[in-house]
Structures are given as C-alpha cells and as structure tokens.
Amino acid sequence: MSATGIAANLRERTAAREAEAMDTAYDGAYAIEARSLSVYYGAFRAVRDVNLHIQPRKVTALIGPSGCGKSTVLRAFNRMNDLIPSARVQGDVLFHGRNLYAPEVDPVEVRRRIGMVFQKPNPFPKSIHDNVLWGARINGYTGNADELVERSLRAAALWDEVKDKLKQSGLSLSGGQQQRLCIARAIATRPEIILMDEPCSSLDPIATLKIEDLMRELVEDYTIIIVTHNMQQAARVSDYTAFFNMDEDRAGHLVEYDVTKTIFTMPKEQRTEDYVSGRFG
Ligand code: ADP
C-alpha cells in the first residue's frame, strides 16, 4: 500500500474508532448533558457552572434576558465555541457518556452528530441540491445523492416547494424557505441533536409558524435545543424550558429547569416568575 493509502486507511480507522468510542459507555438516559459548565471569553466569565441534562427526542428551550449566555451554552453543545479564539470551556459536556471536550474527540464528528441552525438563514451560493448535500459530502457521504436530498428536503417540509427547481440557487428562496433549507442541510448529515439559535428571529409570523410546526415534527426523530427570546415561542414549541439569568458580574447561570408548563405556570423561583410574567428582560 502507498504512503497516502496507508494514511487514508489510518484516518478511516481512527474516525471509526472515535465514532465507536462515542457510542460505548452510553447510559441511554440523556441526549446530552452539561456538567459544571463554565465558558470564558478571555478573562470574562460569560457562563457559570451550568448543570443541564437534555431529554432525548424532546424540544428544550433556553430562555432568559439578552446576554445571559444562552447562545454560548448552545454553542458549547457542539464545540462551536472552539471557532472563537478567545473562548475557553471548563467542565464537561457528556454525549453518549463521553466528554465532548476530551482531547481525542474530533470536533468535526461532533458537529456532524450535533447539527446547528443559525439565527439568519445561511445557505451557500450554490444550488438547493448542493446546499443539502454540503455537510454530508464533507463527512464523506458516498450513497445516493438524489435520494438523500429528497429525504432531507421532505423531512424539512420543503420538498413540495422546491422539487422542480433543485438546480436553482438556495439564495433564490424566501427567508423561511432558506431556513428550512438550512434545516434540511443539518438533517442530511444524520445528526442526533439539532441546535437552533433563534431560528425564527429574522422570519415573518407565517414562516415562523411553519418552522415551529416543523420542529414538532422533527422531534419525533431528533433532540432539539432552541435558544429563543420569544417566550410565546418557547411555550408553544418546547417540552422543557431552561431559564438563565445573570448577576452583577454578568456571568450567566441556570436559574430553573423544568417541564415548560411548570416554568410558565408555577415556577419555583421568584426570578423565573418575574421573567416569564414580563417583569424584566
Ligand atoms: P445570549 O445568547 O443569552 O444573548 P450570549 O451567549 O450571546 O448571550 O452572550 C453571553 C455573554 O458573552 C455576553 O456578555 C456577550 O457579550 C459575551 N459574548 C458572546 N460572544 C462573545 C464573543 N465572541 N466574544 C466575546 N464576548 C462574547
């Protein structure tokens, strides 16, 4: 075997071993779990000592006033903070019983299994078809491309609207369609968890409702964690809600976490009550 062949073979085996290592040790209880999670940007502690276990195949909403660290916590769940040079993560994020921040874990594999959808839809200046395939191709997908594109677009409730124009640019779609295209792109890598960072904040009310409906469909197969500043949205779409707040030092922390109905109707903490009833934030 040539040197490049050996290197490719080694890479393949290493990837397979890492994927397998993530699967063993799984206790089946939670989809993902933050333990004593703190995140710093330089010397500033943006998130303090968060313990949060996420239930599988449920929608969990992260709510709280602006700047309390919701997006930072969300990004910690798929090592997206690694891409911010000043960010430093302390504590553990357990996925299949394994710390995502362990040195041998490959962040690219993490992001395949824990996908992300951003605030503003960000399709690439490529065709609808190629947008869907993008992440799957990076991850070495060699199966039937058309079949994967159709399956992902159907799962994202976009197929009927785009099936006759798959070669058109993703950028030619409306904002709501673009966001569903981004969801299709995330789904195409067959993740277990989809992180959504205010996915409707740039959409009109009808497009917003479509995404919310879609989330309720997707949760049959995926675990969804959504950051939202819209409390009605959290109440409408989520099964569980985590309320974050910050102190004078501006470090965000988890105040209360419970089933959504409890958080909105009979929270245990006064701060939660004040926030959900619109007294601050
Ligand atoms: P939220 O999502 O609740 O609005 P964020 O997680 O975006 O809060 O931000 C939490 C804190 O971390 C804020 O004080 C914010 O200014 C700071 N922060 C967020 N991203 C960065 C970054 N890339 N560099 C430095 N500080 C950041």
Image: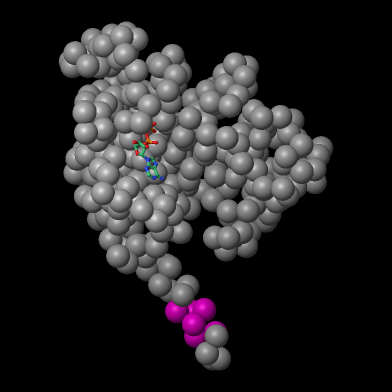
Q: Quarter holding the N terminus?
A: bottom right
User: Residue at position x 57%, y 21% from top?
Assistant: 208
Q: Quadrant of ligand 1?
A: top left
Describe residue 94's horizontal placement relative to residue 184 as left or right. Answer: left
Q: Residue furthest bottom?
A: 2
User: Residue at position x 40%, y 72% from top?
Assistant: 14
Q: Quadrant of residue 150?
A: top right
Q: Is residue 7 highlighted in magenta?
A: yes
Q: Is residue 266 highlighted in magenta?
A: no
Tell me residue 34's x, y (percent): 26, 43
Tell me residue 147's x, y (percent): 68, 49
Q: Evaluate whether residue 62 shows in this view.
A: yes
User: Residue at position x 59%, y 16% from top?
Assistant: 205
Magenta stretch in the rendered image: 5-10
Q: Mainly helix, strand or loop, the magenta region?
A: helix
Describe residue 86's horizontal placement relative to residue 4 as left or right. Answer: left
Tell me residue 72's x, y (percent): 36, 40
Q: Quarter holding the C terminus?
A: top left
In this rendered view, identify the residue nearer to me: 176 or 96. 176
Q: Quadrant of residue 77?
A: top left
User: Residue at position x 60%, y 36% from top?
Assistant: 121
